[in-house]
Amino acid sequence: MESFKDIKVTIKEEKDNYGLFEISPLPRGYGHTLGNALRRILYSSLRGSGITSVQIKGIDHEYSTLDGIKENVVDIILNLKQVKFRTKMDEVFTCKVSAKGKKVITAGDIEVAGDLEVVNKDVVLAELTDSSAELDMTLTVESGVGYKAIDEGERKEVGLIPLDCDFTPVERISLSVEQARKGQETDLDAVLIGVTTDGSISPKDALVESSKILQEFAGKVMVAMGMSEKEVLELEEEANKVEITEDEVKGEDDEIGAWKIEELPISKRSKTGLLAGEFKTVADLRNTTATELLNLPGFGNKSLNEVLELLNEYGINIKGA
């Protein structure tokens, strides 16, 4: 477990419903192991909310048409499937849509109750084209995981139309594994995972929730194998010390600044010159100049370029270089 202690999660980008996260440093091979596990959980195991049935006044089944309305019932159903909801409560909600006269009905016209909230209010549900047209719908909104197929047994009354529903709030995942380094260790992995959601959950929260599910699953396996729940909880507390941060540069600079000169992956000649100039850590190099380095004993252009290349890799620029 020693090699997992310094893992950091850095938010590389966060805009609207998209977030790009870097998880590193990981032992070699764990980039794909962790990345693929999180991707599968993100796609399959997060809760979401959607419309699971609709009842339209004056309609007996989904193959009907409505006077004064541009769309047929099938079109309206397809539009309803696009509506996304947000709620913290695990219960069944009944919502209403009631409209009359010429107008375009959007998801924003859905009357919700409790803490239920429509996420994408601009989705068009139907267009009433006649001043005498009416549209009254009763919607059932449920929360769940994964995909729920239509159950014909739910047609308990005439006019009640069940809908299949994909509860998954994650729309797209991108995943790549790159090389990472820590001090002199260069054979490490970094996972770059991009998460796009439907807006009912933020990308960051989606990644946190998927990590919790992975942790809970692993904990259940450990208990089933004979480990005590107390030991599992202690491991969870230790794991929870890993933080998600946007301050990538500060955290890395503190770590890099503490690197000792003799441990840097540079030539012995360059190390000797730096140590002769009383540079003991990378932090000591931050306020120096290229001219000062060139004046060090046995420190020429080749050594200077070697040091500059290493420091530039971590965003540290020497004055006059």
Image: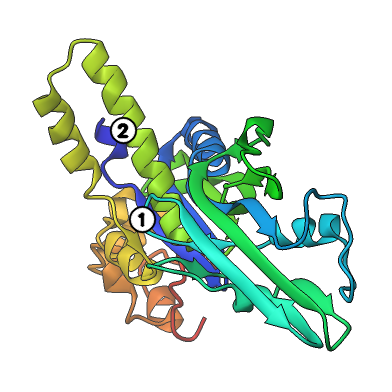
Residue located at (76% from left, 56% from top): 77
Tell me the kind of residue under disc 2: Glu
The image quadrant that residue 72 belongs to is bottom right
Residue drawn at x 70%, y 45% is 158
Identity of the residue drawn at 62% across and 78% down: 109
Q: Helix or strand or loop: what does disc 2 sit on?
A: helix
- Mark nearest the camera among 2 and 1 is 1
Position of 89 with respect to 156 (left or right) is: left
* Colour pattern of the rendering: rainbow
Q: Earlier in the sequence, mark 2 or mark 1?
A: 1
Query: In the rendering, which numbered label is found on residue 255?
Result: none
Real-space Cα distance between discs 2 and 1?
A: 21 Å
User: Residue beneath label 2, please?
Assistant: 216
In this view, which residue lies farthest toward the left?
230
Viewer-nearest residue: 193 or 277: 193
SS label for mark 1: loop
- The answer to which of 187 and 210 lies nearer the viewer is 210
Q: Quadrant of residue 162?
A: top right
Viewed as shown, does residue 85 lie left or right of 269?
Answer: right
Q: Which mark is residue 89?
A: 1
- Mark 1 burial class by Cα count in 10 Å: few <14, some 14-19, many 20+: few
Horizontal side of residue 8 vs 19, given as left or right:
left
Q: Say what amino acid the circle numbered 1 marks.
A: Met
Q: Position of residue 172 (x, y in %)?
A: 65, 52
Q: Residue at x 29, y 65 (%)?
A: 257
Residue at the top extreme? 225
Dot 2 and dot 1 residues touching (CB under 8 Å): no
